[in-house]
Amino acid sequence: MSDIPDSSTVPTKTVDGVHYHQHDVVIVGAGGAGMRAAIQAGPGASTAVISKLYPTRSHTGAAQGGMAAALANVEEDNWEWHTFDTVKGGDYLVDQDAAEILAKEAITAVLELENMGLPFNRTPEGKIDQRRFGGHTAEHGKNPVRRACYAADRTGHMILQTLYQNCVKLGINFFNEFYVLDLIMGEVDGQKRPAGVVAYELATGELHVFQGKAVIFATGGFGKIYKTTSNAHTLTGDGVGIIWRKGLPLEDMEFFQFHPTGLAGLGILLSEAARGEGAILRNSEGERFMERYAPTIKDLAPRDIVARCMRTEIREGRGAGPNKDYLYLDITHLSPEVIDAKLPDITEFARTYLGVEPYTEPVPVLPTAHYAMGGIPTNVKAEVLQDNDTVVPGLYAAGECACVSVHGSNRLGTNSLLDINVFGKRAGDNAVAYVQTADFVPLPDDAAEFVQGLIHQVSTATGTERISTLRRELQESMDTNAQVFRTAETLNQVTEVIGDLRERYKNISVQDKGKRFNTDLLEAIELGFLLDLAEVVIYSALSREESRGGHFREDFPKRDDEKWLVHTMAYLTGDAHSADAGDHIKLSTKPVVITNYQPMERKY
Amino acid sequence: MAEQTTGVLPAPNVPRPRPSRFQGTLYRGREGMWSWVLHRITGVAIYFFLLVHILDSALLRVSPRAYNAVIDTYKQPIMGIGEAALVAAIMFHALNGIRIILIDFWGGGPKRQRLMFWLVLVVWVILMAGFLPRQIGVILSEF
Amino acid sequence: MSTVLEERPAAADAIQKFTATLMIRRFDPDVDTEPRWQEFSVEMLPTDRVLDALHQIKWEQDGSLTFRRSCAHGVCGSDAMRINGRNRLACKTLMKDLDIEKPVYVEAIKGLPLEKDLVVNMEPFFASFREVQPFLQASSKPDKERLQSVEQRARFDDTTKCILCAACTSSCPVFWTDGQYFGPAAIVNAHRFIFDSRDEASEVRLDILNDKEGVWRCRTTFNCTEACPRGIQVTQAIAEVKAAVLRGRP
Amino acid sequence: MTTETVEAPRSARVSRRSTNWEKWAWLYMRGSGVLLIVLIFGHLFTNLIADEGGVKAVDFAFVAGKWASPFWQIWDTLMLWLALIHGSNGMRTIVNDYVSNSTLRRIMLVALLASSIVLIVLGTLVIYTFDPCPSGALQSQLPSFCPAQ
Ligand SMILES: Cc1cc2nc3c(=O)[nH]c(=O)nc-3n(C[C@H](O)[C@H](O)[C@H](O)COP(=O)(O)OP(=O)(O)OC[C@H]3O[C@@H](n4cnc5c(N)ncnc54)[C@H](O)[C@@H]3O)c2cc1C
Ligand code: HEM
Ligand code: SF4
Ligand code: F3S
Ligand code: FES
């Protein structure tokens, strides 16, 4: 079901029930990154956006707190400080050239969104208002600075809506509820290039091949490898998984961010904006424990640090509740007017899902799996890399699925909405420039064969294992063993679980045998991606014997710049289906780009 | 898509959906919906009464006898009950009409629509309480 | 301060589970000629959402049960459905807020073509959204942001919250009649731009909505306002647009 | 309210409207509604309540007595026009809502329009060409001011 049907959303031909389309630029994913790219690409090239969800259902809409840019609308600020904070926040694993671009282009990115209509909150002078956020400081760490541009606690919602509105304005062709399941690669002059993608149309169960000169991946994260997560049910990392299965590398997969303040037990996020507006984390004794760990910026320390401090508090018996297993986020000292104006949605979540009234009661919180720092490696032009420095011409990635790497080992809050806008735009621009000179890569005759096989195999599966059981076992094991704190022992444990699950996955059953809206089938396929990605995450985490940012090895609690100031690159080699990860994953390293800031100890 | 310019969208050519089926439970609307249902029903009822009423009044032009003959039938007790229902309908329709007009033109209307619905009912009950005893008296006097 | 919370989430494990009955209106176009009601029993906690119940059925009992969902906390707008006769988001409706002594009736939203189980065709809904020109139209090209006062920003705040879930439009008795009415959601999204001080095309949108199928078809039944999971004062927004059409400007 | 089928909900209408009748119709419903409250309640009051005996008091003589005064003539004319147009327009809305077959809808709308015109003309004629003392009627049926025949 296409969104704006006109001649260009009609297939060019249909062969053996497979529909063929041709567009200069094919964008996979209609979240913030995908639509930002589409807005750049649409006016200059024939563009198709393929998304497994209606664009406005993408998880960018769940983002709450803000988008960083050193506009200096309320306090002195500049992009150089922002760059520094990003680098330090990422525990120096950030590629500094990319961070510089991110911080510099942030300013235009925000202004462009405003120009497209985004309703930011305003200062009394009518300018875009800004608020504090974790890890964002003035003068290289001196004190917190107001850098996050926001629209109440619905910034992501506004970004997603604004971008969709502008896509409507431009008449972009959307293919909604189309699941991309394969990337078709071809070769030109001995060089790998994308030829197109294959998608499964949810409504009809039919396959569509989209031939494109350039392909942009913007499929978002894969938080569903965890049980307790702020991520949507649909964030199963399909895009990253497809790239992986194509033999292209994945970067820094061991770094997964845990957000300190998820609603206890549920994982629904309470934005860091709460702490930006003055909320305080307290333990069972009512103590503001962050004062002990980060005396300067306290509750506004970066997420990896806060999440670890919280886990430590709980371990040391200062958790609240009957089982002493959660902490409190306290905003009772803020006036209800401020809360209503600046944090309306998250207080509503607390009321709806926990029955807690945030005006008067502190809210139970726990760290929740939140953001994948790693993903598809790209350069600053958003071009996908096939090794440390060779690009795949015509293939781009942007947003959470990509790893530029501007987030290093730990992303600062508000830098992701920024990332999707800056690098989404770059992906669009570069793709348009590329398609001016490039030709279509010929499609093989059996373009859809792999997906046909996959679907056939899964839909006729009559094994004995339930998808949901396997998924739950994976998620639970990840939650206990690959959390904020990890050790070789716990990681080995989850490795075993994954190996076992991968075996059992061969024996699954799918109950829905129909063609229309077969979400049962898709959940099975998504689980396949989750298993693949979890395996890479764990394998990379086992190998990195140090603690940095979001990856904290209790058996190696120190950062080790001598050995580990490098990105991890994981490649799929050998037999993808062998039970032992070591048989089919090969790891190597990629140097970190360091320009201005030499690694220092990270203190706040 | 260079040819697609700002604001001008191609006419969506929505695929013709398969026959839809959506009976199922009755929608559980609240005051707003039920007041509208009543408004609509009373409106139609009054309309048909009005048609008849104009026609019978036209008999005035024919002859006093014809008119009185018809009007006499209105004086039957059964018609008296109908008349009471008509007045009840008109009163509800009129009061709720005021409520609708307030919702439309008074800034505070939409917020207070539910309260206003209950007010409509209260006023309606009061007015009917004033009217019905007399009407019942009239009906009974016919026996 | 910890008193209030003594027996909250963690204690939930210990809390009594109960069995709830769900009546779900199923429809598979390839098999059924008519939708049919099917009964399921699920083990639930009071704090579970209806979405959790649907997941439990799909994951443990009948994998063919089909519904849309994504975020699971009321921000993506995927899972509007009719629960006990009213439009709601399954992920924002807690079991404890329903009368669980009786079966919980779950069916697709009304007025859009039913595709399968709880899934309806959303195209017509998005088509009318697109028709109101839901995007900022401003000719000036400032170097920085366009200024907008706090009050001007507040003017249209309510309608910026819309997540396009269709709970409103599919609760509207006028929309049910023939499906030609623009519907509250489209008007809400027009409102968001009509009253945005930066926009220059309000008149165009007012003209679009001053149509046979536009604002005048609204009969102020308030179902939309009651249904909106974002708490948007939908009918009020429609009334404001009507007033603006009469005035000829926002 | 629980209509069962919708052919193509909100599918694109390519060409749009002529004049904005709907706006004026909407305004008219409200304006006429307000006036009708006065007119109809005045009417009901004089006919059913003010005079002892309710509807029993209404007969040819009663009406003729009223219409002898231009005040009631104008009152009733206004009421006739406003109410009939209000009612017909309301019925038009309802027909538009529920009658999805376009031929049937057209037939019903034309019928509505025609009957409204006929009734308005008829009603107006009755009020103004009305002869309170028609010849050949029984004196007892006529208002008291009629000269004895
Ligand atoms: C609760 C929450 C709060 C957050 N708050 C903030 C914040 O305040 N500030 C900040 O900077 N960041 C925040 N983030 C992070 C940020 O929102 C995300 O990282 C970012 O929005 C990701 O955008 P994206 O475009 O890459 O992916 P998404 O928005 O997730 O979009 C992914 C798209 O890909 C499509 N897709 C996926 N797989 C397929 C497939 N196989 N075929 C076709 N299409 C596919 C989906 O349909 C979707 O359209 C938050 C994240 C969460 C979860
Ligand atoms: C007594 C004073 C009256 C008032 C204040 C009044 C008010 C209204 C109003 C405001 C509406 C518009 C409703 C809407 O748009 O949602 C309306 C509709 C209607 N009215 Fe009246 N009205 C009155 C008398 C009458 C009479 C005498 C008739 C019959 C001839 C009538 C028949 C109708 C009908 C059929 C509708 C359409 C209902 C609908 O669309 O749901 N009304 N009325
Ligand atoms: S107005 Fe409310 S109910 Fe309607 S689509 Fe928007 S969010 Fe959903
Ligand atoms: S339900 Fe419909 S009638 Fe009007 S008030 Fe809402 S749009
Ligand atoms: S699943 Fe996103 S709104 Fe319910």
Image (cartoon, rainbow, N blue to C red):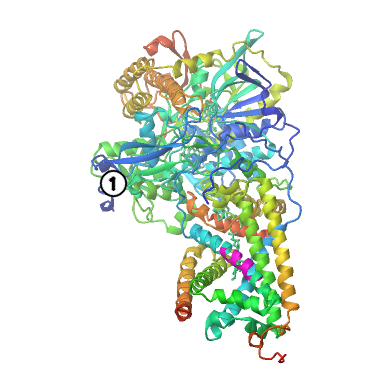
* Secondary structure predominantly adopted by residues drawn in magenta: helix
Amino acid at the residue labelled 1: Arg
Is residue B47 located in the magenta-colored stretch of the structure?
yes
Measuring from the top left, give residue A94's x and y in whole percent: 50, 28
Q: Report whether A600 appears left or right of C145.
A: left
SS state under label 1: loop
Q: Is residue A245 left or right of residue A2?
A: left
The residue carrying pointer 1 sits among few (fewer than 14), some (14 to 19) or many (20 or more) residues within 10 Å by Cα, namely: some
Q: Chain of mark 1?
A: C
x and y percent of residue A200 in the render? 55, 23
x%, y% of residue D148? 71, 92
Q: Taking A500 as reference, is C27 above or below it?
A: below
Q: Is residue C248 visible?
A: no
Which residue is rendered at x = 50% and y = 23% of the image? A240
On the image, the x and y values in percent for residue A59 come to 50, 36
Question: Which of these two is toward me, B22 or A138?
Answer: B22
Image height of A50 relative to B11, above or below:
above
Give the magenta part as a residue range: B45-54
- Residue at point 67%, 26% (across, down): A10
Which residue is nearer to you in this view: C28 or A401?
C28
The residue wearing badge 1 is C8
Q: Is mark 1 within 8 Å of ligand 1?
A: no
Q: Which of the two residues, D88 or B81, is positioned nearer the viewer here?
A: B81
Screen quadrant of the C terminus of chain B: bottom left
Quarter where residue A551 is shown:
top left
Q: Is residue C93 visible?
A: yes
Q: Residue at x 53, y 49 (%)?
A: C168
